[in-house]
Image (spheres, grey):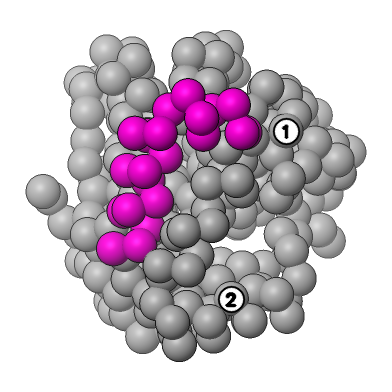
Amino acid sequence: MPVFEKKDVTLNYATFGDSSNPALVFSNSLGTSYHMWQPQIDALQNDYFIICYDTRGHGLSSTPQGPYSLNQLGQDVINMLDYLNIDKAFFCGISMGGMTGQWLAIHYPDRFHHLMLCNTAAKIGTESAWQERAQMVRDQGLYPIASTAAPRWFTEGFVDSHPDVVDALSNALAAGSSEGYASCCEALSVADTREQLKDIKVPVTVLAGSQDPVTTVADGQYMVDHIDGANLVTIDASHISNMEQPEVFTQLIRDYLTI
């Protein structure tokens, strides 16, 4: 797999499709890898030049010393685009990836045509809860988080009907880097874009899962209310909506991420 090195981090990334097509960056959620986007890669690689990567501390990317910051997570994307000589791209990120997208929209609007911020919020959870989770993962590893992740990720019906998908994602989380996960928890503990949403001047679509207990439709509505011209779309899914409703999710990308 290709890797990209910059300063303290080596990012594992992959590209799909013709580089003459519009570039589309996918950014993964906490505790996953770029493989979470496989349904969208399969469906969209003939229409976009798809760029997937593992967030630092995840997948096959390196795990530099933490704690991490939202600034670092966002700058990793810009450095990767520079490395690939891509001036402007579409962006789609879920949960932590959606927070990364907010940072990009605020700080690098000229690098993006349109950003889709999915199952995310301007402030996810509380600082104390994230710090407690980071400490627990450092003390106990990722198995306790992985063993209880399914109800946060998916609806009960999906868990019951797709045990293979749920088990694969849970097992991948359990096998991940505890330090990388904890360091990203620390980034999320202080990540808060609420005061900066009004400064976003690039097209944004916010996607919320109607059954998401982590980042709710109300969280999505808050973002849309504070980002000039933003759209809110809902999807009948929980937190990992691109995997629970892949066809609907992919169609929303086609509908909104167009030049």
Q: Residue at x 53, y 21 (%)?
A: 245
- Name the residue tied to disc 1: 211
Name the residue carrying label 2.
Answer: 133
> Quick check: 162 above or below 86?
above
The amino acid beneath tag 1 is Gln
Q: Residue 146 is drawn in which quadrant?
A: bottom left
Which residue is at 43% across, 47% downward?
28
**Residue furthest front in the image:** 160
As helix, strand or loop, the secondary structure at mark 1 comes to loop
Residue drawn at x 40%, y 67% is 143
Q: Is residue 87 visible?
A: no
Q: Residue 179: x, y in percent?
A: 38, 79
Q: Is residue 8 visible?
A: yes
Residue 159 x/y as whole percent? 51, 34
What's under tag 2, amino acid-wise?
A: Arg
> Is 241 or 71 nearer to us in this picture?
241
Is 25 within the magenta? no
x, y percent for residue 129: 70, 75
Q: Nearer the viewer, residue 22 or 161?
A: 161
Note whether 138 is above or below 37 in the view shown: below
Circle 2 Cα neighbour tier, 10 Å, few/some/many (<14 / 14–19 / ≥20): some
- Residue 162's disc number: none
- What residue do we see at 22% from left, 28% from top? 16
- Image location of residue 145, percent across then percent down: 50, 65
Q: In the picture provided, is 129 more to the left or to the right than 182?
A: right
Magenta segment includes 171: yes
**In the foreground, 146 or 82:** 146
Residue 21 falls in image quadrant: top left
Disc with the residue nearer the chain's start (1 vs 2): 2
Of all residues, the one furthest to the left in this rendering is 1
Q: Is residue 69 left or right of residue 123?
A: left
Question: From which residue to which does the magenta span run?
Answer: 155-175
